[in-house]
């Protein structure tokens, strides 16, 4: 079945460092891909998405490109801030929105 | 708009007790779902609904019941709680009603219910 694999955390960075969180997926057809973020004590919220191959999703300085040839959707940010500390989830949907599949999540700590 | 509201925020149960986790949304979303979040496993889908009177199972439905009598509400029932059900539970909703375009729709999440079963 469909699945999402993302790098284990936690990831600890200093402020203004470059961030990459790896995400790869297994799916038939052409799923939509998402990154969700969970701040402490809150539910998940959509960070960005891409709906077809070579699409780039972007939001709040974060970017991810849908790479069908490598089945990847890596999250990047050029300069992280303390306020980016959170758990990041890679996800896919291939079911018309009924059964979104999530990765295990990657916790990011950013030090001042 | 309040969005997706979950109650309670915290709950401690003894093994064998029953309880209902409440979820309500005020966005007129047809689709609602329940996920559980466990360390190292991400979010796993328990049950979902595509409208009043329609529910279906997700990845981990055993031990949980749901019903959808109104568009707004989607309660999750634990009939006989077990320690394996200790988790954080999230309710989510979306505009999705299936079809290719619906794969692009995002989920709106509640703030979660932290459940401990002793």
Image (cartoon, coloured by chain):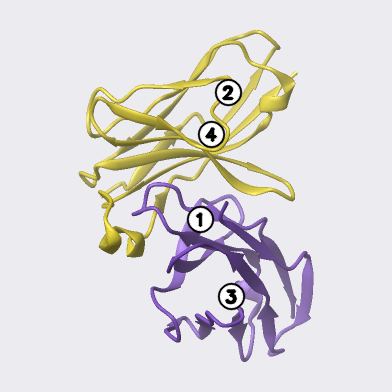
Chain colours: A purple, B yellow
Task: Tell me the element at label 4.
Answer: loop
List the single residue furthest toward the front.
A28
**Residue B3 drawn above or below residue B70:** below
Left or right relative to B79: residue A96: left
Q: CA distance from mark 3 to mark 4?
A: 37 Å
Q: Chain ID for label 3? A: A
Q: CA distance from mark 4 to mark 1?
A: 15 Å
Q: Earlier in the sequence, mark 3 or mark 1?
A: 1
Residue B84, percent from left and from top: 72, 26
Say which of marks 3 and 4 sits in front: 3
Q: Secondary structure at mark 1?
A: strand
Q: Residue at x 34, y 65 (%)?
A: B104
Q: How would you rate the neighbour count of disc 1 (Cα within 10 Å): few for under 14, some for 14-19, many for 20 or more? A: many
Residue on which disc 1 sits: A44
Q: Are marks 3 and 1 on the same chain?
A: yes
- Cα distance between the residues tagged 2 and 4: 22 Å
B55 shown above or below A81:
above
Query: Mark 4 or mark 1: which is in front?
Result: 1
- Foreground residue among A43 and A56: A56
Q: Chain of mark 2?
A: B
Q: Secondary structure at mark 2?
A: loop
In-image side of B19 versus A74 (left or right): left
Residue B62, numbered circle? 2
Residue B107, percent from left and from top: 39, 54
| Chain of residue at mark 4 | B
Up/down of B75 relative to B88, above or below: above
Q: Name the quadrant of the C terminus of chain A.
A: bottom right
**Mark 3 sits on what residue?**
A71
Which numbered circle lies on residue B9?
Answer: 4
Measuring from the top left, give residue A60's x and y in whole percent: 47, 81
Report helix, strand or loop for mark 3: loop
Residues at discs 2 and 4 both on one chain: yes
């Amino acid at each position: 079945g469909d699945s999402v694999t993302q790098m284990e955390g936690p990831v600890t960075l200093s402020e203004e460092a470059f961030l990459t969180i790896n995400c790869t997926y297994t799916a038939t057809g052409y799923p939509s891909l998402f990154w969700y973020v969970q701040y402490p004590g809150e539910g998940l919220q959509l960070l960005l998405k891409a709906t077809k191959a070579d699409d780039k999703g972007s939001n709040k300085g974060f970017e991810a490109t849908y790479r069908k040839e490598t089945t990847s959707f890596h999250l990047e940010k050029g300069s992280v801030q303390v306020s980016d500390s959170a758990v990041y989830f890679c996800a896919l949907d291939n079911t018309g929105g009924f059964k979104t599949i999530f990765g295990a999540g990657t916790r990011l700590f950013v030090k001042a | 708009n309040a969005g997706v509201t979950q109650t309670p925020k915290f709950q401690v149960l003894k093994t064998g007790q029953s309880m209902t986790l409440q979820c309500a949304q005020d966005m007129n979303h047809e689709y609602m779902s329940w996920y559980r979040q466990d360390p190292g496993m991400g979010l796993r889908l328990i049950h979902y609904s595509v409208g009043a009177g329609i529910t279906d199972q997700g990845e981990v439905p055993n031990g949980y019941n749901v019903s959808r009598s109104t568009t707004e509400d989607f309660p999750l029932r634990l009939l006989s709680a077990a320690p394996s059900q200790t988790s954080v539970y999230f309710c989510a909703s979306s505009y999705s009603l299936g079809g290719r375009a619906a794969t692009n729709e995002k989920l709106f999440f509640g703030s979660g219910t932290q459940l401990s079963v002793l």
